[in-house]
Image (cartoon, rainbow, N blue to C red):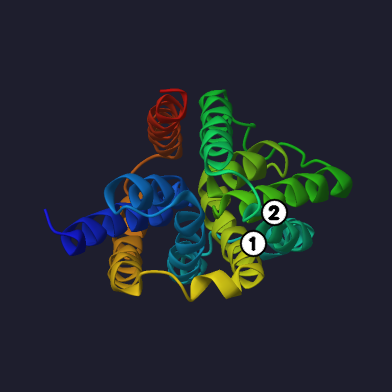
Amino acid sequence: MSVLILALAAGAVTGLALGALGGGGSVLTVPALIYLLGFTPSAATTASLVIVTLTSATALSAHAREGTVRWRAGALFAAAGLIPAVLGGAVSGLLPPALLTGAFSVIAALAAVRMLRPAAEPGAAPAGTGRITTAGAGLGAVTGVLGVGGGFLAVPALVNVVGLRMRAAVGTSLLVITANSLAALLARAGTAQSLDWAVVAPFAGAAVLGAWDGKRLAGRVSGGTLRRIFAWALLGVAALMLLDVVL
């Protein structure tokens, strides 16, 4: 199978995940770039930020028109993560590839387990501002270091910490992903020039188109079903990546 076809297929899946689940795109993008398209872990995390920034911004516009974005909560959450995202992006290039891959798999697995636990009751009282900003800062750091949008952490945090319903958490997480990914990408601006744009561009284009289909899928599937699909997909990817590091 040609590299172009692989890039288009992986991009479409990434877009579907971001559009339907408000996350999971980068947790799928990084492994696809490494194992299917031959990127190094460092290049894959930078390319992932380019792809996820464009795709999440597209998906955000679709969710905003549906009224599922909670702008105030999302802006507070995202603002807390901007500086950690920039710092993490600067540090990431200094870390060994095996450490990046192992850390990525562990974070994904922990997020999946959290998503399989019962979500906060709809309408539950949100946490205080301090806890929200702490969660946002932690998410920003993970975004910067691992090159992920952080939706696989943002969605459970917005549900369990902020107290949003699942569908609102999906829409709001896209605001957080866009802001954090852009901040982390700016910290890696010098490395983006060396990317293989003949692969990154079609990957990103397919992901943007897939995000629109993902948004339509989200309107037809219950929040609980989305959460379970999201969690099991994360567990599968995490297990495969961890095995690769160990073996």
Regarding mark 1 in the picture, which secondary structure is present there? helix
In the image, 20: left or right of 199?
Answer: right
Circle 1/circle 2 CB separation < 8 Å = yes
Residue highlighted by disc 1: 180
Q: Amino acid at mark 1?
A: Asn
Q: Nearer the viewer, residue 28 or 117?
A: 28
Q: Which residue is mark 2?
A: 140
Crowd band around label 1 with a 10 angstrom C-alpha radius: few (<14), some (14–19), many (20+) = many
| Amino acid carrying mark 2 in the image | Gly
**Which residue is rendered at x = 20% and y = 60% of the image?**
3
Question: Residue at left 51%, top 33%?
Answer: 105
Residue 186 visible somewhere in the drawing: yes
Label 2 sits on a secondary structure element that is helix
Out of 204 and 2, give the one closest to the viewer. 2
Q: Quarter holding the C terminus? A: top left
Q: Is residue 232 above or below residue 180?
A: above
